[in-house]
């Protein structure tokens, strides 16, 4: 254990299961540790570094902004905030934007917005229906929204107003909708919950049900958005349009940011009803604008389709070779590999030894989410390291 890792044990709250690696530098799809050893990064800061580490376009824009204006309060106008808001609206089905600082803050704000809508248009309806296995963040309310008891149990009693129903079950949502319901909130693909894909027609059916019931359809695209799945937003591939959408992870290359987007009809916050000190400040907005602009102008989502297919083909090849691989699933550059035994942690450590970072998704599954700028050579390298690691695993 290095000095820094010992300091972590002494000074930091032990909430993270850490991998024994201290990252000191990153460039593109690679990071380096204290000893100068290089690793191929298929974690990408939990799907945050969409353009890889320290992308020149983002570094340039952020460096100039840092020297010009880092922060102003939101009772003044600032240019980067408006540039990012305009770009988001021009490239999505939504009409208005609110910027905050993290994913949980975005989903929590989306729920507040849905409750305002309920107060104004649905006779005070306030309940939000969410799915089992979902993940919407770590604030008390979002822990309550997330349909996973491991996040909820340590903190009961939880804020009320959420109903968790079975994922991929349209009847369960139908049954749960009542006069108290103001919205349904789903991830297009459940990320943290296991890279769980929606069954064909599920999201469309949910949107139609929401329309019929006059309630809001919220999509949490914090993990799936910004090109990750092969389109700028995942909803585009499922033939649906949310009334409210949240973004965060891949939006600003790692400068903290979150965003709530809403259709005009759902954009019901009045002056003073919501806000944020740091949200949409010039620095974070510049990071978001330069990241998103580069992704759009250079068709990076297209690369995520092609490289995602290349990666998925490679993973499926491995599945043919190793019978203890029980599933390979995902969309674009959000891929998971599942095993018939709890080998994910050991496999992750073996990959680390081989110079590849992968994410332990569950005891029996790993997740691969490289930067969206990844190329075939790097995927081939990663697959070779993974194959070697799999060969060495005795189940
Ligand atoms: C990561 C994530 C969040 C929470 O984001 P934070 O920035 O960690 O608060 C919420 N929803 C989804 C779908 C996520 O993947």
Image: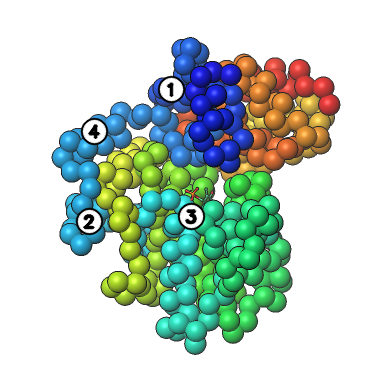
Please tell me whether mark 4 sits on a helix, a strand or a loop. Answer: helix
The disc label shown at residue 104, or none: 3
Gap between marks 1 and 4, in whole Å?
19 Å
Between 143 and 41, which is closer to the camera in this rendering? 143
Residue count near mark 3 (Cα–Cα under 10 Å), binned few <14, some 14–19, many ≥20: many
Nearest-to-viewer mark from 4 and 2: 2
The disc label shown at residue 73, or none: 2
Between discs 4 and 2, the one toward the N terminus: 4
Gap between marks 3 and 4, in whole Å?
27 Å
Residue count near mark 4 (Cα–Cα under 10 Å), binned few <14, some 14–19, many ≥20: few
In the picture of the structure, the residue carrying the numbered disc 1 is: 24
Q: Position of residue 136 (x, y in %)?
A: 55, 56
Gap between marks 1 and 2, in whole Å?
32 Å
Gap between marks 3 and 2, in whole Å?
21 Å
Whether label 3 touches label 4, CB < 8 Å: no
Please tell me whether mark 1 sits on a helix, a strand or a loop. Answer: strand
In the picture of the structure, the residue carrying the numbered disc 4 is: 63
Does label 3 point to a residue whose CB lies under 8 Å from ligand 1?
A: yes
Residue 74, by quadrant, is bottom left
Between discs 1 and 2, the one toward the N terminus: 1
Between 98 and 6, which is closer to the camera in this rendering? 6
Between discs 1 and 3, the one toward the N terminus: 1
The disc label shown at residue 170, or none: none
The residue positioned 44% from the left and 58% from the top of the image is 106
């Amino acid at each position: 254990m290095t000095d820094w890792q010992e300091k972590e044990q002494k000074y930091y709250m032990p909430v993270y299961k850490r991998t024994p690696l201290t990252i000191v530098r990153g460039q593109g799809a690679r990071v380096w540790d204290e000893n100068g050893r290089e690793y191929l990064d298929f974690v990408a800061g939990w799907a945050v570094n969409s353009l890889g580490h320290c992308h020149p376009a983002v570094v340039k824009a952020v460096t100039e902004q840092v020297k010009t204006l880092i922060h102003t309060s939101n009772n003044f106008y600032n240019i980067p905030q408006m540039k990012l808001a305009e770009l988001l609206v021009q490239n999505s089905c939504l009409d208005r934007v609110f910027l905050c600082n993290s994913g949980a803050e975005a989903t929590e704000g989306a729920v507040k917005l849905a409750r305002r809508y309920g107060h104004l248009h649905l006779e005070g309806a306030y309940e939000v229906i969410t799915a089992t296995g979902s993940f919407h963040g770590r604030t008390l309310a979002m822990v309550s929204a997330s349909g996973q008891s491991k996040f909820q149990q340590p903190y009961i009693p939880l804020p009320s107003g959420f109903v968790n129903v079975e994922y991929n079950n349209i009847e369960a949502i139908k049954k749960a909708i009542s006069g108290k319901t103001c919205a349904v909130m789903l991830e297009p693909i459940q990320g943290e919950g296991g890279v769980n894909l929606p069954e064909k027609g599920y999201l469309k059916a949910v949107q139609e049900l929401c329309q019929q019931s006059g309630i809001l359809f919220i999509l949490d695209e914090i993990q799936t958005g910004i090109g990750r799945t092969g389109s700028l937003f995942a909803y585009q591939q499922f033939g649906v349009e949310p009334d409210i959408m949240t973004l965060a992870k891949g939006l600003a290359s790692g400068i903290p940011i979150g965003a709530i987007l809403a259709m005009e009809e759902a954009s019901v916050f009045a002056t003073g009803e919501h806000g944020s000190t740091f949200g949409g400040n010039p620095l974070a907005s510049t990071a978001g604008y330069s990241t998103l602009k580069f992704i759009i102008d250079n068709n990076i989502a297209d690369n995520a389709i092609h490289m995602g297919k290349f990666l998925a083909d490679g993973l499926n090849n491995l599945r043919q070779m190793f019978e203890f691989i029980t599933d390979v699933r995902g969309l674009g550059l959000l891929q998971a590999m599942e095993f018939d035994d709890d080998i994910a942690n050991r496999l992750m450590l073996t990959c680390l030894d081989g110079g590849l970072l992968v994410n332990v998704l569950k005891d029996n599954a790993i997740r691969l989410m490289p930067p969206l700028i990844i190329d075939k050579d790097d995927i081939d390298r990663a697959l070779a390291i993974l194959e070697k690691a799999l060969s060495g695993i005795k189940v």
